[in-house]
């Protein structure tokens, strides 16, 4: 028997009203656009759903950035749902570890087209089309911030629906890069006979399995350099055991990491022209973009320019923009990379001071205790709460480069 086609938007991790920590120093006009970007991405999602004339929209957790979210965020979401309601598009929503329901000040007062998984028990909600139950949609919401048990066993097919779609906000049991919530095994999901698994929680889009599709769409708007590239949702069409997935970018501001070769620069002023050329390309390609720039050179003068503040001056000069244009590029941070005329592995084999120093760097894994005096400084502690592992590795690398270049430059 031929099944009727259904189509839907699979989204997750909207993080509405995200505070965008670490971006407070950007120009006011740009920061205002950054603060509004999650709401603008939500609007782009609504317009896409209307354009594609989908049957329904799935939002698989972390709708808000915090469970104590703002009234503005709640009203923006309600307005988006009302737009979808005007086009007869249903919404199925679950809350995740960021917007867990315990202690929330709000009661859901959404229009009738919105169906919320209200508790931590996996339940099914029907979607009816042309007089029949076209799909049963299964899911749960986080009551507390953390769910540590595997929820997959709770997903059990119910009823005679044409399609069965599971929503789950959680992590692969083996994930080491993020906090592991509601851990699952792909093999367990494959054995459940669902037509589609709509995942949330991980902010990078990923198709874990093709048949049935087990899919992370990622978040709809990047929030830091760690969330670079396109961000958006999947438009999914299901019919007769086949699934067609099309990714659609929704981000309003893009985060990117850019490498800039300044090897040919003989004077710090030359860096300005190189940066202006690279940023013009970025604006043409990305629209609005926040960059982390890695300055690369095969000349040791790059290290000196960093120490004397010339690189910071160049970035500050380039960033002197008002943000009112339709496209702009802003450099949030930078680092340096120098092509060494020494080999780290070979150097460590030598029985001399530089070799012993190189070995010491390789043997030192964590440098957190060496950074404690900075965090305890009465002025620094106002601005620093700590260093991530990535930041510690970068500091360690720069320290090694500085010492080795000074030791070996002659």
Image: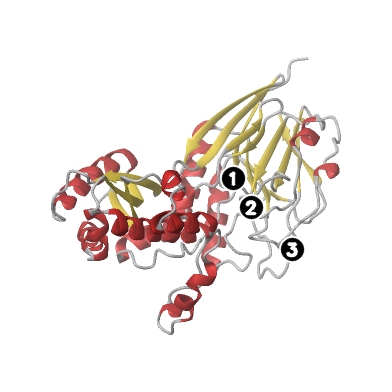
Q: Quadrant of residue 280?
A: top left
Residue 84, horizontal then vertical, whole percent: 56, 44
Q: Is residue 110 above or below residue 69?
A: above
Q: Nearer the viewer, residue 362 or 330?
A: 362
Viewed as shown, does residue 1 lie left or right of 323? right
Q: In the shown orientation, is residue 170 left or right of residue 264?
A: right
Q: Quadrant of the C terminus?
A: bottom left
Which image quarter is the N terminus in?
Answer: top right
Q: Are marks 1 and 2 in contact (CB under 8 Å)?
A: yes
User: What residue sits 34% from the left and 42% below the top?
Assistant: 286
Which of pointers 1 and 2 lies earlier in the amino acid sequence? Answer: 1
Quick check: can you spot residue 321? no
- N-term-proximal mark, 1 vs 3: 1
Q: Earlier in the sequence, mark 3 or mark 2?
A: 2
Q: Which mark is residue 85?
A: 1
Q: Is mark 1 in CB contact (under 8 Å) with mark 3?
A: no
Real-space Cα separation, disc 1 to disc 3, in angstroms: 30 Å
Between 298 and 241, which is closer to the camera in this rendering? Answer: 298
Label 2 sits on residue: 111
Q: In front of the other: label 1 or label 3? A: 3
Q: Which residue is mark 3?
A: 144
């Amino acid at each position: 028997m031929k099944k009727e086609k259904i189509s839907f938007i699979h989204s997750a991790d909207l993080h509405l009203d995200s505070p965008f920590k670490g971006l407070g120093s950007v120009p006011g006009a740009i920061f205002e656009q950054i603060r509004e970007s999650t709401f603008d991405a939500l609007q782009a999602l609504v317009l896409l759903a209307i354009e594609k004339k989908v049957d329904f929209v799935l939002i698989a957790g972390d709708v808000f950035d915090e469970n104590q979210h703002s009234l503005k965020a709640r009203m923006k979401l309600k307005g988006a749902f009302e737009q979808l309601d005007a086009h007869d598009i249903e919404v199925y929503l679950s809350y995740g570890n960021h917007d867990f329901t315990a202690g929330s000040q709000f009661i859901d007062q959404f229009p009738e087209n919105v169906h919320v998984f209200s508790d931590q028990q996996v339940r099914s909600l029907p979607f009816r089309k042309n007089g029949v139950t076209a799909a049963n949609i299964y899911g749960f919401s986080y009551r507390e911030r953390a769910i540590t048990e595997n929820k997959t066993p709770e997903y059990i097919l119910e009823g005679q629906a044409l399609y069965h779609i599971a929503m789950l906000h959680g992590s692969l049991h083996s994930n080491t890069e993020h906090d592991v919530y509601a851990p699952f095994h792909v093999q367990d999901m494959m054995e459940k006979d669902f037509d589609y698994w709509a995942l949330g929680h991980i902010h990078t889009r990923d198709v874990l399995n093709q048949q049935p599709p087990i899919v992370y769409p990622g978040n709809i708007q990047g929030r830091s350099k760690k969330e670079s590239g396109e961000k958006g949702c999947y438009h999914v069409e299901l019919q007769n055991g086949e699934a067609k997935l099309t990714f659609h970018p929704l981000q309003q501001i893009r985060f990117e990491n850019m490498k800039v070769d300044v090897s040919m620069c003989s004077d710090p002023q030359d860096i300005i022209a190189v940066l202006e050329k690279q940023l013009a390309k970025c604006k043409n390609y990305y629209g609005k973009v926040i960059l982390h720039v890695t300055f690369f050179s095969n000349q040791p003068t790059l290290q000196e320019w960093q120490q004397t503040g010339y690189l910071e001056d160049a970035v500050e000069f380039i960033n002197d923009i008002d943000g009112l244009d339709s496209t702009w590029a802003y450099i949030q941070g930078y680092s340096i990379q120098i092509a060494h005329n020494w080999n780290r592995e070979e150097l460590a084999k030598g029985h001399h001071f530089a070799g012993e120093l190189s070995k010491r760097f390789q043997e030192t894994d964590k440098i957190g205790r060496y950074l404690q005096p900075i965090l305890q400084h009465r002025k620094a502690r106002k601005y620093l709460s700590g260093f991530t592992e990535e930041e510690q590795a970068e500091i360690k690398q720069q320290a090694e480069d500085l010492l080795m270049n000074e030791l070996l430059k002659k």
